[in-house]
């Protein structure tokens, strides 16, 4: 299974096996990783699964759709160039090794 | 406070979140989560969306991995039903006659599909649980062009209709009221949703009830007979309040709780679909069926059990996915006396601002997520926004609030 690394705001790293076709958000929530809230459970409705993709990332990621783009203006922490909603990033073998950084807060 | 034993009755979205939130908030005592389904706690919204379409399986629905519960000291009892609560002895009684002592008990018993009060109801399937969805999938599997009749044009009925249409079946929705989603959205929004469904080839009949269902046929109250290979009903739910009622707690179409989600017994709370609570947003007792309500109330009750004293005041919000339409509602729009539509309905991107006595009570955002999120903030903060301001040509929620902040 692809491995995804979640880096908490305090720097603590957690590596999780994420099932094919699950999302980066689900990988965190299923394993009880704090730092990703996902109020709406993946409906692209709440903007509480905000992550910063590692600046060094070279893995291909899903394209950003308009809803995600708009929601990212309303996240609790500042939107940056590498901001994504983790519920909109499906995981396949191509994302094995992806690193995402979690913001200080989601609400 | 620490070390107290909590029993959660019901392991849906609300019940499981009570357990998760208790641990996240540092509760150290025993937690027992009892659910009558075999599956680990899972999300229901995808049942009418990706799960039904076969895009995701049960593993894609579960809220936490199985190991999460063990790792966090949450005793998850599956496939078991709590049949009674002895408030004197402070124990929950399971169907197998085992008892679990509690210091705090939380009812998160949810709701069940409202039975269809017509002859032939046994031919009609419901859609509430993963088992229900599996039964429907089995009936649809591998085929196209089946005649599917959906009784009820609410959230469940319309989402189901959209998915089944995408699976290339012939779909008719029968709604007894004059408008679909009447409890949930304004006439403007409902009209656009109906238009969207019709453009996809779904037939929507309103103002017509179902008189009877027979093998392969649905008879409507106006005499029309529809051919039906599959009939699915989504006509609302009945809250599961029987155990609470037998335990002597106040029940009135829901387990009655106060602003702290406490029942008439201070050691017992109720959350989610089964709870009728005092809502500052509705100005009275209401019962809501939504993910937001389930998870926010669960988190609030965990805080209350941990000794918190804050009343529950979270703003209600909802969403629905039908085809490429994302409908998001902030606030409760029911009971509005004026609406102002902003955006471009012809392009399928607009928001309906709903007012009551000149006061904004809710926003229905139809493919306009910014209005939804900004609307939540405005409604949460109580910022005044009058219909005349919203009705001005070129009104834009984002720029209007930026101006205010400047």
Image (cartoon, rainbow, N blue to C red):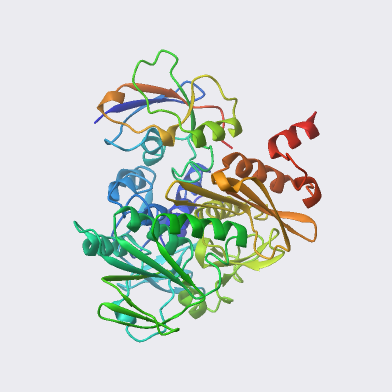
Left/right of residue B8 with respect to residue B191 in the rendered view: left
Where does residue B17 sit, x and y in percent of width and height?
A: 47, 51
Q: Is residue B2 above or below residue B101?
A: above
B375 relative to B48, above or below: above
Residue B366 visible (yes or no): no
Query: Which corner quadrant holds the N terminus of chain A?
Result: top left
Q: Nearer the viewer, residue A73 or A19?
A: A73
Q: Give the vertical position of B145 relative to B387 (above or below).
A: below
Q: Is residue B138 left or right of residue A68?
A: left
Q: In the rendered view of the protein, which quadrant contains the C terminus of chain A?
A: top right
Q: Is residue B362 visible?
A: yes
Extreme-bottom residue of the structure: B119
Q: Position of residue B11 (x, y in %)?
A: 40, 59
Q: Position of residue B360 (x, y in %)?
A: 74, 53
Residue B163, by quadrant, is bottom left
Q: Position of residue A15 (x, y in %)?
A: 34, 27
Seen from the viewer's position, the closer of residues B121 and B175 is B175
Identified at 49% across, 74% down, the residue is: B241
Q: Nearer the viewer, residue B275 or A10?
A: B275
Residue at the (51%, 37%) spot, across then down: A67
Position of residue B229 relative to residue B224, above or below, is above
* Number of marks in the rendered image: 0
What residue is shown at x 50% (from left), y 77% (from top)? B247
Which residue sits furthest left? B142
Along the horizontal axis of the image, is B152 left or right of B342? left
């Amino acid at each position: 299974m692809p491995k995804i690394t979640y880096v908490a705001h305090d720097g603590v790293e957690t590596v999780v096996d994420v099932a094919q076709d699950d999302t980066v958000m689900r990988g965190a929530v299923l394993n009880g990783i704090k730092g990703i809230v996902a109020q709406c459970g993946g409906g692209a409705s709440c903007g509480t699964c905000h992550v910063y993709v590692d600046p060094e990332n070279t893995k291909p990621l899903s394209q950003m759709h308009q809803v995600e783009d708009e929601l990212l203006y309303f996240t609790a922490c500042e939107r940056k160039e590498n901001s994504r909603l983790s519920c909109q990033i499906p995981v396949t073998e191509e994302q094995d090794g992806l690193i995402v950084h979690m913001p200080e807060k989601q609400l | 406070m620490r070390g107290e034993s909590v029993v959660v009755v019901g392991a849906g979205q609300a019940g499981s979140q009570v357990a998760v939130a208790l641990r996240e908030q540092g509760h150290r005592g025993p937690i027992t989560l009892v659910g009558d389904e075999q599956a680990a706690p899972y999300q229901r919204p995808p049942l009418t969306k990706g799960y039904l379409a076969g895009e995701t399986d049960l593993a894609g629905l579960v809220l936490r991995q199985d190991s999460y519960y063990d790792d966090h000291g949450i005793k998850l009892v599956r496939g078991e039903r709590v049949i009674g609560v002895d408030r004197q002895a402070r124990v929950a009684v399971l169907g197998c006659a085992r008892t679990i002592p509690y210091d705090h008990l939380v009812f998160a018993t949810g709701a069940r599909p409202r039975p269809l009060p017509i002859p032939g109801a046994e031919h009609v399937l419901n859609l509430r649980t993963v088992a229900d969805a599996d039964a429907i999938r089995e009936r649809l599997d591998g085929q196209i062009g089946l005649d599917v009749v959906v009784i009820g044009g609410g959230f469940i009925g319309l989402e189901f209709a959209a998915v089944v249409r995408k699976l290339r079946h012939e779909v008719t929705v029968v709604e007894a009221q004059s408008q679909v989603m009447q409890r949930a959205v304004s006439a403007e929004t409902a009209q656009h949703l109906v238009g969207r469904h019709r453009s996809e080839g779904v037939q929507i009949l309103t103002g017509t009830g179902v008189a009877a269902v027979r093998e392969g046929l649905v008879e409507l109250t106006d005499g029309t007979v529809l051919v039906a290979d599959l009939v699915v009903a989504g006509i609302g739910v009945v809250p599961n309040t029987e155990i609470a009622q037998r335990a002597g707690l106040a029940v009135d179409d829901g387990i009655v709780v106060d602003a702290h989600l406490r029942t008439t017994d201070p050691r017992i709370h109720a959350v989610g679909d089964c709870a009728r609570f005092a809502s500052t947003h509705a100005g009275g007792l209401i019962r809501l069926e939504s993910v937001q309500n389930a998870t926010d109330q669960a988190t609030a009750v965990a805080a209350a059990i941990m000794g918190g004293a804050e009343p529950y005041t979270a703003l209600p919000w909802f969403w629905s996915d039908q085809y490429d339409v994302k409908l998001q509602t902030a606030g409760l729009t029911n009971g509005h006396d004026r609406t102002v539509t902003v955006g471009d309905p012809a392009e399928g991107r607009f928001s309906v601002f709903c007012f009551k006595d000149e006061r904004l009570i809710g926003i229905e955002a139809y493919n306009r997520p910014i209005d939804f999120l900004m609307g939540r903030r405005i409604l949460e903060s109580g910022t005044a926004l009058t219909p005349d301001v919203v009705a001005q040509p070129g009104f834009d929620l984002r720029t209007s609030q930026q101006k205010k902040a400047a």
